[in-house]
Amino acid sequence: MLRSRRWTGDRAFSSSVTVIAIGVPVLLGAIVLLLAVDAMPSITHYGFGFVTNSTWSPAAEQLGGAAYIFGTVVTSSVALLLAAPLGVGCALFLAEYAPRWLRGPVGSVVALLAAIPSVIYGLWVFFALAPLMRGAIEPLLKTTLGEPPVVGALFGVPAIGADLLIAAVILAIMILPTVTAVSREVLLAVPDTQREGMLALGATRWETLQKAVLPYARSGIAGAAILGLARALGETIAVTMVIGNSSTRISASPFTTGYTMSFSALVEVALLLLLVAVIVNMLARTLVWSVASGPVRVP
């Protein structure tokens, strides 16, 4: 009788968690369907030109999302270029070099950074980092890189302290905990036999990391970077506070004000953002799982 009750309880619990698990993709599908239905008038009216046109004039009924997409792609890409090396380096320190008494506190600080709301980051950048960028860093970049013919075209414009570069910097700070935490877990998932084999052959610590640990974990680290990119693509509040929000002109200069896709209220832009976030997250999860599921061939 007791065994029968336990079996019934197991079946009930299994059924409950199965329904909950199925509900997550169903909810995501419902959100996508709702956005697609609401965005259908814009899709049918503007077609693919909505993605390629940067004109934004509601009075003239000319709406294009190219500037929003450009701002999102540029700021997120630059943020990833800034955050990925720092995040992987921090993860290597925590997983391979830091003493045990230091790993816990530093790991807790990294987790705390990931939990800070976006608006707090935005306020900190607006009152602290943006004046520093405007008064010291951006003039230095303009003086140093503004003279060469090709690069000078990017950094030769006036720096006003509310532009794509500052938005990219704040995004890099915000995604740094994600890249660090996931990369650290990937590195810890590398079997100790990988390290012990290299050390037994007389390799140094760095040679062990370079030839045994990093090749094993490279797909997972790439997944960590893409997860950070996915978060950068979806951030709104902090970027809105520092990007300027005053230009729909597409320019390669990092000192140009702009918008991001998250700032636009158009349902079609929201649909595009959601689809991009889903695809990027699925790709990142696949790369991380490939490391956690088993060994890979190391050249």
Image (tube, helix red, strand yellow):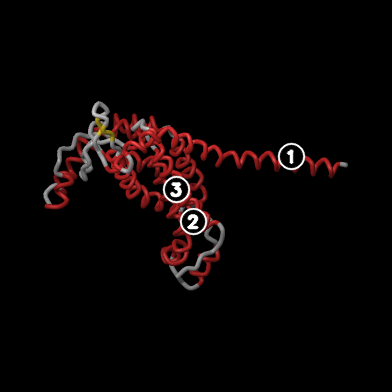
Mark 3 or mark 1: name the one nearer the start of the chain.
Answer: 1
Callout in the foreground (2, 1): 1
Q: Nearer the viewer, residue 222 or 194?
A: 222
Q: CA distance from mark 3 to mark 2?
A: 24 Å
Quadrant showing the N terminus: top right
Callout in the foreground (3, 2): 3
Relative image position of residue 193 (x, y in whole percent): 55, 66
Res. 206 visible in picture: yes
Q: Nearer the viewer, residue 22 or 244?
A: 22
Looking at the image, residue 294 sits to the left or right of residue 126; the answer is: right
Tag 1: amino acid: Ala
Relative image position of residue 18 (x, y in whole percent): 65, 42
Label annotation for residue 12: 1
**Mark 3: secondary structure:** helix
For the point 45% across and 35% down, which residue is it?
Answer: 37
Figure check: 66 above or below 287: above
Q: Residues within 10 Å of mark 3 (few under 14, many from 20)?
A: few
Q: CA distance from mark 3 to mark 1?
A: 33 Å
For the point 45% across and 70% down, which residue is it?
Answer: 299
Relative image position of residue 276 (x, y in whole percent): 41, 44
Q: Quadrant of residue 244?
A: top left
Tag 2: amino acid: Leu
Mark 2 or mark 1: name the one nearer the start of the chain.
Answer: 1
Label 3 close to label 2 by CB (< 8 Å): no
Res. 137 visible in picture: no
Query: Circle 2 is placed at which residue position?
Result: 187
Q: Residues within 10 Å of mark 1 (few under 14, many from 20)?
A: few
**Mark 1: secondary structure:** helix
Q: CA distance from mark 2 to mark 1?
A: 38 Å
**Mark 2: secondary structure:** helix
Relative image position of residue 228 (x, y in whole percent): 41, 46
Label annotation for residue 279: 3
